[in-house]
Image (cartoon, rainbow, N blue to C red):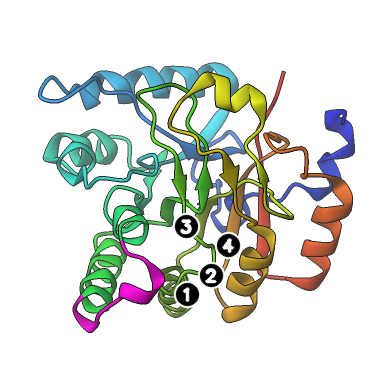
Amino acid sequence: MKMKNWTSFVFALGVLFSASAYSSDGVDVHMHLSPGRPPNLDFKASVETLIAKMDQLGIGRVIVMPPPQVQNQTTAYLADQFMNAIHAHSGRLLWAAGGDELNPIIHSTPPGSITAEIRNRFESIARRIVADGAKAFGEMAALHFSFNPRHPFEQSDPDHPLFLLLADIAAQTKTPIDLHVEAVITRQPVPKALASRSPNNPATIQPTISGLEKLLAHNRNATIVWQHIGWDNTGHLNVKLLRGLLTRHPNLFLALKHVD
């Protein structure tokens, strides 16, 4: 599908933030830093590279966030040097968190195994993230394919009880959820192209759209931003699907991924 057919359906998290503090109106709502690998992390250099690219492209502000993790990597993304690098450009760089701490808890906890201790710990982390100044919970993942042997496959029901809890916290604190999820209508084999790229992808993938609708309906005051619209790895993502979801769920927002 040509990109022009998507444009009327693209809504971005940026509508929730004013860009008036900077002369450019561009707002990129989803960006990752590449500071290197522990212990040789250089967030300052990564941030300076990002600022230079923003200037080149006319982007006023950016929300930076950790990619969705399956193991807790908090030390890599909330290290002092990360926060210092972000705060050095506080007029232009906002930050989101949760992909490094909350996402691993969801993906390591089967829905039927959630205890009061797990719920309390999850909620405590989420509220601390908001208190620390994060502008969104992200990047969270319900279904994320593996694109190379070192890249994990991630799938958890979008209506997992901890996602529902996060929606309640998001609604109460007015903190949007940045969500990575592939469109899967019915259980199907993993696409051949993805199976060949990584052995971490399973033979079959489970539906996501029904669970996504349950998440959206759970708390209408929770803003859910579905990331990477226009990037379809399953063959199920189309304008008809998006039109229906947007009509039924006023708390759903879409963010565009440019696909060459």
**Residue at 25% in and 45% down:** 71
Residue 156's label in the rendered image is 3
**Residue at 59% in and 47% down:** 205
Residue 164's label in the rendered image is 1
Give the amino acid at mark 1: Leu
Mark 4 or 3, nearer chain start: 3
**Residue at 61% in and 52% down:** 226
Q: Secondary structure at mark 4?
A: strand
Asked if residue 202 lies in the magenta stretch, the reply is: no
Give the amino acid at mark 2: Asp
Residue 224's label in the rendered image is 4
Mark 4 or 1, nearer chain start: 1
Q: What's the CA distance linking mark 4 and mark 1? A: 11 Å
Q: Secondary structure at mark 2?
A: loop
From the image, state whether disc 1 or disc 3 is nearer to you.
Answer: 3
Disc 2 crowd, CA 10 A, few/some/many (<14, 14-19, 20+): many
Q: What's the CA distance linking mark 4 and mark 3? A: 16 Å
Q: What's the CA distance linking mark 4 and mark 2? A: 13 Å
Residue, disc 2: 159
Give the amino acid at mark 4: Ile
Q: Which residues are magenta?
A: 109-117
Q: Residue furthest front?
A: 203
- Residue 44 seen in the figure: yes
Rendered-image quadrant of the N terminus: top right
Q: Is residue 56 above or below residue 139?
A: above
Q: What's the CA distance linking mark 1 and mark 2? A: 6 Å
**Residue at 26% in and 23% down:** 35
From the image, state whether disc 4 or disc 3 is nearer to you.
Answer: 3
Mark 4 or 2, nearer chain start: 2
Mark 1 or 3, nearer chain start: 3
